[in-house]
Image: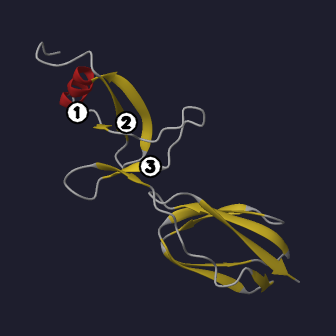
Amino acid sequence: MSDQRDYSTVVEAATYDETGRITGVVKQGIGFTEDALARGERLLLGDAGWDPVGFKTTRYVDLSSGDPMIQDRPVLAQTFDRPTLPVRQEATLENVPACRVTFVGPVSGTHDHPGGDLEVGFTVSGDYLISFEAFPNLPCTHQLTVTP
């Protein structure tokens, strides 16, 4: 600790991991935050948009430039080329970043998608919810109806 630092003025800082995912917030004297930064801890002053009930946020720390910045997580705007399809045919979601895909319906499971166009098809008819999170994008869910 330094006698030169201000330990009484309270600030909010986001804690984050090596990917930029915000893992929490601290509200403490700015001097304590400066001490933590000097120790190499990942903290960034600013409003993290932290939900203390759900323990989450819709923001992240953008590490793509030289200066980390708190940003809103983008929304994946893509939609499947068709929301209804017959069994043994596929619907396509274009340009999806690498992510884990979870599908829930008459058949459920997960799939690690390497990135690129995501093609989804089923051999059992029914309604399916397809969910994925390609960080830093917000998680999203799409519904597909597979007909006999």
* Other residues around mark 3 within 10 Å, as few (<14) / some (14–19) / many (≥20): many
Q: According to the image, label 2 marks what residue?
A: 15
Residue that appears at 60% across and 32% down: 53
* Other residues around mark 1 within 10 Å, as few (<14) / some (14–19) / many (≥20): few
Point out the frontmost of discs 3 and 2: 3
Query: Mark 2 is on which residue type?
Result: Thr
Q: According to the image, label 3 marks what residue?
A: 59
Residue that appears at 24% across and 16% down: 7
| Distance between the alpha carbons at the discs numbered 3 and 2 | 12 Å
Element under label 3?
A: strand
Query: Mark 1 is on which residue type?
Result: Gly
Query: Mark 3 is on which residue type?
Result: Arg
As drawn, is 145 to the left or to the right of 18?
Answer: right
Residue 69 x, y percent position in the rendering:
29, 49
Along the polypeptide, which appears first: circle 3 or circle 2?
Answer: 2
Along the polypeptide, which appears first: circle 3 or circle 1?
Answer: 1
Q: Nearer the viewer, residue 28 or 116?
A: 28
Residue 22 x, y percent position in the rendering:
42, 42
As drawn, is 68 to the left or to the right of 129?
Answer: left
As drawn, is 107 to the left or to the right of 110?
Answer: right
Q: Nearer the viewer, residue 86 or 109?
A: 86
